[in-house]
Amino acid sequence: MPLLYLLRHGEIESPRRDCFIGHTDVPLSSAGRDQILAWRDHFRDLAFGAVWSSDLLRAVQTAELLSPGRESHIRTNRELRELNLGEWEGLPRDQVRAAHPDLWKARGEDLAGFHPPGGESFSELQSRAVSCIHRICAEELERILIVTHAGVIRILVCMILEVPISNLFRIHIDYAGLTIIDFKHAVPIRAVNALPIGKANTAYPRHIS
């Protein structure tokens, strides 16, 4: 099994703070590009057998910044996307909570199984994303970079640690946070939410993205 580098995309351009952004296709912000360029220096001497990315723009841009001159080698897969939030996409959390108190309560009571109208549940996200990552790992023998989203990384960490999905928001993943997993070891998680030295985020925008 390969050594797996899971990188959350950089900070995004968002019209509103504290809103649901899952499949909404938004680009990296200027600060987000700088976050990823900081990683490029750290990755310069690492040989990746493959570079995979979610097909959403913010992830593809991240992968391209990390692979200058090798953009054609980046492989994308929509199964690495963030949670599909359906009709809640782009809406502020406070607005959703006020407009749909019963749904908001149901979400809190069953985070794993609840899905917003037209969207998917975290259990469904786990099924598609983890299956995709397993297929990628089966194809490669070396170090792999996967650029994806906070939800995907949290879900995978929960699965490895046998932590209930209901606790996934206890795992903090910054923009440009790096998680390293080595399935060859009995304790496979080597790092969670690592950031380039001197590049720690000073603010934590609350997006699902």
Image (tube, rainbow, N blue to C red):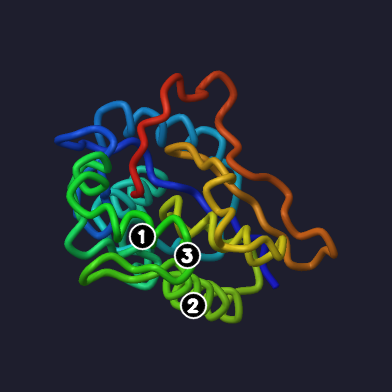
The residue that appears at 34% across and 68% down in the rendered structure is 115
The CA span between labels 2 and 1 is: 13 Å
Using the image, determine if residue 121 lies above or below residue 69: below
The residue that appears at 51% across and 33% down in the rendered structure is 41
Task: Name the element at disc 1.
Answer: loop
In the rendered structure, which amino acid carries the disc numbered 3?
A: Asp
The residue that appears at 27% across and 61% down in the rendered structure is 85
Residue neighbourhood size for the residue with mark 3, other residues' Cα within 10 Å, grouped as few (<14), some (14–19), many (≥20): some
Q: Position of residue 87 (x, y in %)?
A: 17, 62
Q: Position of residue 40 (x, y in %)?
A: 47, 37
Identify the residue position indicated by label 3 in the image. 110
In the depicted view, which residue is nearer to us: 32 or 166?
A: 166
Identify the residue position indicated by label 1 in the image. 82
In the depicted view, which residue is nearer to us: 173 or 109?
A: 109
Residue neighbourhood size for the residue with mark 1, other residues' Cα within 10 Å, grouped as few (<14), some (14–19), many (≥20): many
Quadrant in which the N terminus is drawn? bottom right
The CA span between labels 2 and 3 is: 17 Å
